[in-house]
C-alpha cells in the first residue's frame, strides 16, 4: 500500500489538488444547505401562500393601475388586512403581469393563484352559462342589471364554476360597452359592414358583430393599441374608463354610445385555495370584497361621467345613436338560443323586476 509522502496531501492527493477539492466540497455543501432551506421554506407554505402566521393571497388582473376596478381591489386589500388583524394579505398584480385573463383563470384552477378578476365574457369556455351576460341588450337599465347580479340568478352563476375548480366571489361594475372606431362613427348596424371590430374573447360577442355585418378578429387586449394604430382593426368596443386608461383615444377618435352589452367583471377564487381556508377566513374575505363592490360602484359612476366629459373636451367625437336598430339587428341571436340553457337564463333575467301582470303575460 502506498503511503503518503512529503509531496502528497489529503488522502494521498498531491498538495496542488488539495485546495481545489476543499473549495469544491465547500460549494457542494452550500448548494445542499440552500436546497434544504428552500425545501423547509416550501414546506411551510400552503396553496394559499402561507408564510409564518400570514397567508398571502395573490390576485391578478389585466387592467391599468389607474382603473376604478384596481382602486376597488386596493380597498379590498386594506379592509381584509383590517378585518383579519393582518393575518390575510391580498397581493394585487395588475396590467396582465401574470398573464392574460384566460391564463390566470387556468392558474386559479390549479391553485397557483388565489384570485383572478376577469370579464364574464372570457369565461364562456370555462363556465358556459356565463355566456348569458354577453347577450346584447339583455338588461333594460342599470337597476335591472344590479337586481340580477345581486339576486338569485347572479349568485347561482357565481357558483356555476365550482365543478371546474373556481368559485365566484363578487361582481364588479364594468358599465356598458360601446363601439369606438378609427375612421368613422358607428351610427347604425350597417356602419359595421366589412369593418374589423375587436371584441372580448367571447363567441357570443363575435356573433353579435358578425350579425351586424362586421368581422371580429382575435386580438389580445395588450396588442390592441398597435392593431388600431396600424390599421389591423378598424375599431373595438369597451366601456369609457377602459377606453381612456388604455389610451385608445389616441388612435380611435369616434366613440358611439350604443351600449350594446353590460358584461360584468367577476372575481374568481381557486377552489383549492378557497376550500383550504377556515370559515372565519372566508367570511373576512367575503365581507371585504362586498365592501369593495359598494366602493367601486360609486367610483365607477364618477369615473365614467368624468371620462366622457374629458374625452369630449379632448376632441373625441362622442355620438348617441338610436339603439332601436341595434336591438332589432340582434333579435336572431335570442331566437338561436331560445331552447338552450343560456336562452332559458336570458328569459329568467328578462322577467326580473317586471310587474306581476307583465310576467303573467
Image: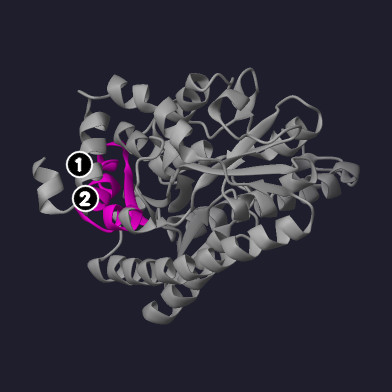
Q: Which image quarter: residue 229?
A: top right
State how the image is colored: one colour
What stretch of residues is rendered in magenta?
Answer: 145-170
Circle 1 sits on which residue?
348
Where's residue 18, x and y in %?
A: 83, 47
- In-front residue for pair 56/151: 151
In the image, residue 82 lies in the stretch drawn in magenta: no
Residue at x 21%, y 50% (from the top left corner): 352
Q: Quadrant of the C terminus?
A: top left
Q: Residue at x 45, y 66 (%)?
A: 297
Q: Secondary structure at mark 2?
A: loop
Location of residue 349 (image quadrant): top left
**Quarter that holds the N terminus:** top right
> How far across and down, in percent of the image, does residue 340 sit?
22, 25
Is residue 149 left or right of 29 when viewed as pictured?
A: left
Q: Nearer the viewer, residue 127 or 183?
A: 183
Task: Say the numbered circle drawn on residue 24.
Answer: none
Q: Which mark is residue 352?
A: 2
Question: How far from the left and from the top, in percent, is residue 123?
Answer: 41, 37
Determine crowd level at label 2: few under 14, some 14-19, many 20+ residues with C-alpha closer than 10 A.
Answer: some
Q: Is residue 128 above or below residue 314?
A: above
Q: Position of residue 239 (x, y in %)?
A: 56, 49
Residue at image location 56% in from the left, 31% down from the top: 188
Asked whether residue 154 is drawn in magenta, I would say yes
Q: Is residue 38 left or right of residue 30?
A: left
Residue 113 makes an appearance in the image: no
Is residue 177 visible to the viewer in this orientation of the structure? yes
* Mark 1–mark 2 CB contact (< 8 Å): yes
User: Label 1 to label 2, Cα distance in Å?
Assistant: 7 Å
Is disc 1 placed on a helix, strand or loop?
A: helix
How many numbered discs, if any?
Answer: 2
Of residues 264 and 159, which is closer to you in this image? 264
Amino acid at each position: 500500500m502506498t503511503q503518503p509522502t512529503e509531496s502528497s496531501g489529503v488522502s494521498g492527493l498531491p498538495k496542488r489538488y488539495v485546495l481545489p477539492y476543499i473549495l469544491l466540497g465547500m460549494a457542494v455543501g452550500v448548494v445542499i444547505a440552500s436546497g434544504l432551506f428552500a425545501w423547509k421554506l416550501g414546506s411551510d407554505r400552503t396553496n394559499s401562500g402561507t408564510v409564518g402566521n400570514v397567508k398571502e393571497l395573490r390576485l391578478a388582473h389585466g387592467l391599468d393601475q389607474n382603473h376604478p376596478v384596481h382602486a376597488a381591489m386596493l380597498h379590498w386589500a386594506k379592509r381584509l388586512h383590517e378585518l383579519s388583524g393582518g393575518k390575510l394579505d391580498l397581493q394585487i398584480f395588475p396590467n396582465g403581469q401574470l398573464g392574460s385573463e384566460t391564463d390566470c383563470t387556468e392558474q386559479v384552477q390549479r391553485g397557483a393563484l388565489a384570485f383572478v378578476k376577469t370579464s364574464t365574457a372570457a369565461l364562456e369556455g370555462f363556465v358556459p352559462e356565463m355566456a348569458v351576460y354577453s347577450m346584447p341588450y339583455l338588461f333594460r337599465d342599470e337597476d335591472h342589471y344590479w337586481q340580477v347580479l345581486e339576486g338569485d340568478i347572479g349568485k347561482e352563476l357565481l357558483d356555476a364554476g365550482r365543478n371546474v375548480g373556481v368559485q365566484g366571489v363578487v361582481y364588479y361594475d364594468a358599465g356598458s360597452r360601446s363601439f369606438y372606431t378609427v375612421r368613422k362613427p358607428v351610427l347604425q348596424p350597417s356602419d359595421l359592414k366589412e369593418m374589423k371590430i375587436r371584441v372580448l374573447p367571447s363567441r357570443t360577442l363575435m356573433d353579435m358583430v358578425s350579425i351586424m355585418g362586421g368581422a371580429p378578429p382575435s386580438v389580445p387586449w395588450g396588442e390592441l393599441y398597435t392593431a388600431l394604430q396600424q390599421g389591423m382593426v378598424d375599431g373595438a368596443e369597451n366601456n369609457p374608463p377602459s377606453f381612456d386608461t388604455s389610451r385608445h383615444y389616441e388612435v380611435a377618435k369616434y366613440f358611439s354610445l350604443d351600449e350594446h352589452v353590460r358584461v360584468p367583471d367577476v372575481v374568481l377564487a381557486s377552489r383549492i385555495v378557497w376550500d383550504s381556508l377556515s370559515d372565519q377566513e372566508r367570511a373576512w374575505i367575503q365581507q371585504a370584497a362586498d365592501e369593495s363592490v359598494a366602493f367601486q360602484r360609486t367610483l365607477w359612476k364618477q369615473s365614467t361621467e368624468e371620462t366622457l366629459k374629458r374625452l369630449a373636451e379632448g376632441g373625441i367625437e362622442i355620438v348617441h345613436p338610436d339603439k332601436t336598430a341595434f336591438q332589432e339587428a340582434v333579435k336572431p341571436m335570442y331566437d338561436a338560443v331560445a331552447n338552450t340553457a343560456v336562452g332559458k337564463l336570458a328569459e329568467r333575467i328578462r322577467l326580473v323586476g317586471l310587474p306581476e301582470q307583465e310576467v303573467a303575460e
